[in-house]
Image (tube, rainbow, N blue to C red):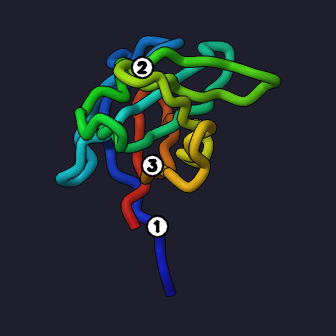
Amino acid sequence: MNSMTWKDLCSRDDLVPGSGVAVKIGNEAAALYWPDAAREQLYALSHRDPFSQAEVLAWGLLCEHEGEWSVAAPLYKQHFRLCDGVCLEQPDVVLSGWPVRFNGDRVEVCIE
């Protein structure tokens, strides 16, 4: 049976609504996003841009279109959907991601 383990990542105060922040999840650099302060929805995707190979995605521009959030990579401007990491311009390119949530004033990530 596969159980999910939630690990403490950071404080809610470490996040800025409407932007991303770079974090470490295990040994991997990740980008943590809180797009809308009115909602408790968080997203965690790989911080490495697969097109430039640079760790820059936490600093990308958050975009909302028809209720769906994405991040525009700072260098070449590809858009990655926050809910699943799919590149909107090249759907065969997908970022790795992690389940992430608020637990009171803490942010937790799921490590399987």
**Residue 8 or residue 33, whichever sits in front:** 33
Q: Which mark is residue 95?
A: 3
Give the secondary structure at mark 2: loop
The relative height of residue 103 versus residue 36 in the rendered view (above or below) is: below
The relative height of residue 45 versus residue 6 in the rendered view (above or below) is: above
Q: Amino acid at mark 1?
A: Met
Q: Cα distance, mark 3 to mark 1?
A: 20 Å
- Residue named by callout 2: 60
Where the C terminus falls, by quadrant? bottom left
* Rendered location of residue 14, percent (x, y): 33, 18
Q: Cα distance, mark 2 to mark 3?
A: 14 Å
10 Å neighbourhood of mark 1: few (<14), some, or many (≥20)? few
Q: Amino acid at mark 3?
A: Leu
Q: Earlier in the sequence, mark 2 or mark 3?
A: 2
Q: Amino acid at mark 2?
A: Gly
10 Å neighbourhood of mark 3: few (<14), some, or many (≥20)? some
Q: Cα distance, mark 2 to mark 1?
A: 29 Å
Answer with the quarter of the image where residue 50 lies. Answer: top left
The relative height of residue 96 versus residue 31 in the rendered view (above or below) is: below
* Rendered location of residue 44, percent (x, y): 45, 40
Answer with the quarter of the image where residue 39 lies. Answer: top right
Give the secondary structure at mark 3: loop
Question: Which residue is pictured at 47% across the width and 74% down the height?
Answer: 3
- Residue named by callout 1: 4
Q: Earlier in the sequence, mark 2 or mark 1?
A: 1
* Rendered location of residue 9, percent (x, y): 31, 39
The relative height of residue 70 versus residue 45 in the rendered view (above or below) is: above
Q: Residue most toward the left?
A: 27
Give the secondary structure at mark 1: loop
Determine if residue 12 is in view. Answer: no
Question: Which residue is pictured at 24% across the width and 33% down the height?
Answer: 55
Q: Earlier in the sequence, mark 3 or mark 1?
A: 1
